[in-house]
Structures are given as C-alpha cells and as structure tokens.
Amino acid sequence: MGGLTLTALVVTGIGELTTGGATAPEWSGPSALVAGADGRIEWVGPAHRLPQGTEGPVVDVQGRAVIPGFVDSHTHLVFAGDRTAEWEARMAGRSYAAGGIRTTVDATRAATAEHLAARAGRLATEALRSGTTTLEVKSGYGLDVATERRLLEVAGGLTSETTFLGAHVVPAEYAGRVDQYVELVRGEMLAACAPLARWADVFCERGAFDADQSRAVLTAAAAAGLGLRVHGNQLGPGPGAALAAELGAASVDHCTHLDGADVEALAASGTVATLLPAAEFSTRSPYPDARRLLGAGVRVALASDCNPGSSFTTSMPLVVALAVREMGLTAPEAVRAATAGGAAALRREDVGRLVPGCRADLAVLEAPASAWLAYRPGVALVTAVVQGGRLTAGAWP
C-alpha cells in the first residue's frame, strides 16, 4: 500500500488490537492503525508494516490494548426521578415486575425538556467516558403523545439511533383499556413520533403487551418506515422472541427465558439476541444462556439497558465482566458482542469494528489485553476514547 496523506490520527505501539472482525484479536504484537481525515479507518496491521509516508498526529499507546468503541444498542437514558426505593425493596427480596415503570412516567411527564436533556446528557457523557461511542436511546417514559415526542426530541440530541417505545407499559389512565391504548400508540402517537425515530420497540411481556397487541404496534411502525426492535422473554417464557423473528426485527432484547423453538427461530431469521446482564444483576434474576445461543448460530449482542428501575448503569465494561462471569462468554466473545454485536443489533456496518472503511471509534485501555475488562471488574480501564478519529474523552497515555 502506498503512502497515505491527510490522516487525522495514527495510533501505534498497540499491545493487543481487537478489530471486531473475528472472535479473537487479530494482532497480539505491536500494532498500529491509521484514521483518515474523514474520520474513518484507512489501515490496520502490525506496526512494522505501517505505510511509508503516512502523515498526521502520531500517538504511541505504549503497549496498551485498543478495542472498538462500545456500541450500546439498548438504553433508556431520557427520564426524570429515580427508583431507589424500588431497588432497595428488591435487594430485600421483592421480585421485579414491569409496573414500576409508571413511577418514572409520572416524574418524566412533570419534567421540563431542559431538565430531561441535561440529565440524559450527563448519562451519555458518563457512557462515553467508559468507552461507549454509539448509543441507542428509547422513549417510553411519557406514554402520551406530547411527552413521547418530547423524549424523542431529547434523544435525537444525543444520537441518530432513536427508538419509539410508546408501547412500554399501559399508563394508569388507560387501566383496563389496553386495546384502546394500543390504538393510540399505533395511530396518533406513532404519527407524531415516527419522524423523530429510526426504530420502534414494544415490551411484549406479561404486565405489558401480549403478542397480538405487540404485533399491531410493530406492523404499524413498519408501515411508517421504522425498523423494529422487541423487549421479550425477560420475566418468563413468552411470545416476544418468536414475534421478533416472524417480523424480521433487528433485535429481541433480554432473552432470559427462551425455549428451543425460540432459539431456532432467531437463528433462522437473523434477529440479534441482545443480552442485558446488568438487568439480571440488578433484579437478582436468572441470566440468559449465551452459550446456547452462540452454539445454535444466533448472533449475540450485549447492551447496558440503562434505566432507573432495573439497570441503572451506563458501564459497558461492567456488562462485559458480567457476561464473562455469569453467562459463560469468553472475554473476546463478550467484547465482540459489546461492539460488533451491538452494531449488528442496530444494523450498522460502519461502527463496532476497527477495519478499513469503518468509523475510527475506539477505546484505549489501561491494560495489555481486552480480557482485563473482565479480569479487573469495576476498575476504570478506559483511558482514552476516540470518535471519528478525534479524542473525545480521557487523555492519551
């Protein structure tokens, strides 16, 4: 390859470079990468083969590991209030149920757009500092037309990966009138929110929406041009995973309780199974069987599920550590699920990997290998974060 010019960044001295293109790091010796002026990867490989004539700022990370920026494909960052009391009750032994969402709905409806944006912005910054360079953000704590639209306006200030979740739970004012609420969601609410969203989601679960109600919302959303996502099979066996596969949803998220037919359907459809181990950690629930999914050929992603009730964390390093400790993934599998897997769940080809043509989104670790994300859980190992070839959080070594 000839000399490269107009580079935005050259990172060299990489001790272990994980590109996301395989289940293991491609290079464990001194490696380098080059980001072009357009913010995309131009070249990766062994440091001794760095193209001659490459121009641009050069950073030597002195043997540290480099991974793709995390792609967190499931978050609920826009909300007001907190649910500390609910969490304390769970720690004392009370089981998790979907009904606590309504507590957050009340607080969120009462909050100003400025308050919501400030809080969501702080959470997004927190996520960035721990290595997350791509975020999906849902609505779902408004459950009326005006508030759902306001939540998506705030989410759109954070990311292009916005999801309409009007079908989160049934709000109190529609108690006993679920079908009427479904008609609101798939009619007036969808019409108001679709221009601000890329995706639509539904909580297909006991205590929320059944298969027919979920299908009605999702088919209307698809007709409006939105991609599909599903919350499913979190609280027990149910129709969510099968429905996601039937409708060609990009992902079904949670997947704690799957039967053999669910797994087969996901493998055949290509729908990504997005696992949210921080939710199991925070609700003391069983963890999904990630090894079973991988063995069946299902694509797996990891995400934070950041929300005030069941998973109040933005830390993808924590998610990786839990996936290794509790779900049986190897460290390389977990890192790949949290990067390239998350990108697949968003149907993105330009993020989650460090290969030519992808965005130069990466995290430098204060560690010689990505396995240290699980080996040293709870330690802030992300020392520098790059988005589009520019340092956006932390500092160079």
Image (spheres, rainbow, N blue to C red):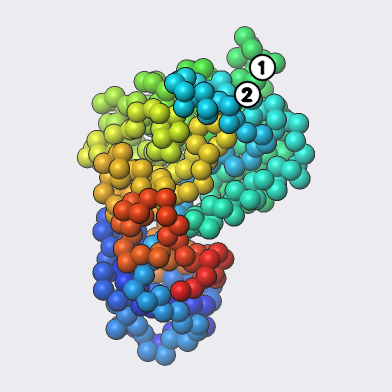
Front one among 127 and 136: 127
Secondary structure, mark 1, is helix
Residue drawn where x is 35% and y is 54% of the image: 376
Q: Which mark is residue 102?
A: 2
Q: Determine the image quadrant of residue 382.
A: bottom left
Q: How many angstroms separate mark 2 from mark 1 (CA)?
A: 7 Å
Q: Which residue is mark 1?
A: 172
Residue drawn where x is 62% and y is 33% of the image: 82
Residue 235, visible in the rendered structure? yes
Identify whether 386 is placed above or below 90: below
Residue 199, visible in the rendered structure? no
Q: Residue furthest bottom?
A: 53
- 269 relative to 177 in the view: left or right: left
Q: Residue furthest front?
A: 92
| Mark 1 residue type | Ala
| Mark 2 residue type | Arg
